[in-house]
Amino acid sequence: MGLKSSREENVQTVLHNILAVGTSVKGDITTEVDFRLDGKIEGNILCNGKIVIGPKGFIIGNIMSVNAEIMGHVEGSLKISGKLTFKSTAVVKGDIQTQTLEVEPNAIFNGTCVMSASQAAGQAQQSQNNHPQQGRK
């Protein structure tokens, strides 16, 4: 009576968004949950969870997230407050700010890197404060 079953609670904790292969979006994306990109985006992404750019994923724009795993192409800056991982298939052209960086052999990164826990986290929080959630229309 009025209590959620443990199954309903577990389902809510694994919510995430996917932009599939063959899908293109022009514009900014903001999400409160994890996000996987296997398509193409021309715009910025603000993710309050983990973002995964799949091997066929491609973004021209900036990414701000808590954690990120890059397997595809990124052209833009990345501000990650937690852990940023470049897998072996990653191609990144842009500057990064993160607390923790993991780079696999054969990953390609052209840009500058600033590793500072307080700076990346502070900028992500500042951006979130400057871009409050807007209601859907």
Image (spheres, rainbow, N blue to C red):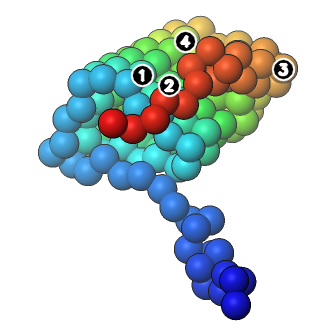
The spot of residue 87 in percent (x, y) is 50, 42
Q: Is residue 117 above or below residue 31?
A: above
Tell whether label 1 touches label 4 (CB within 8 Å).
no
Q: Is mark 3 on a helix, strand or loop?
A: helix
Amino acid of disc 1: Asn
- Residue 41 lies in quadrant: top left
Circle 2 packing at 10 Å, graded few (<14), some (14-19), many (20+), is: many
Q: Return the disc, 4 or 2, that comes first in the chain's sequence.
A: 2
The spot of residue 101 in percent (x, y) is 68, 31
Q: Return the disc, 2 or 1, that comes first in the chain's sequence.
A: 1
Circle 1 packing at 10 Å, graded few (<14), some (14-19), many (20+), is: many
Residue position marked by numbered label 1 in the rendering: 44
User: Which numbered circle lies on residue 31?
Assistant: none
Tell whether label 1 touches label 2 (CB within 8 Å).
yes
How far, Cα to Cα, is label 1 from label 3? 22 Å
User: Which numbered circle lies on residue 95?
Assistant: 4
Tell whether label 3 touches label 2 (CB within 8 Å).
no
Amino acid of disc 4: Asp
Q: Return the disc, 1 or 3, that comes first in the chain's sequence.
A: 1
The spot of residue 42 in percent (x, y) is 28, 22
At 65% across and 75% down in the image, what residue appears?
9
Q: Is mark 4 on a helix, strand or loop?
A: loop
How far, Cα to Cα, is label 3 from label 4? 17 Å
How far, Cα to Cα, is label 4 from label 1? 14 Å
Residue position marked by numbered label 3 in the rendering: 118
At 59% across and 33% down in the image, what residue appears?
65
Q: Is mark 2 on a helix, strand or loop?
A: strand
At 50% across and 25% down in the image, what residue appears?
63
- Residue 49 lies in quadrant: top right
Amino acid of disc 2: Ile
How far, Cα to Cα, is label 2 from label 3? 18 Å
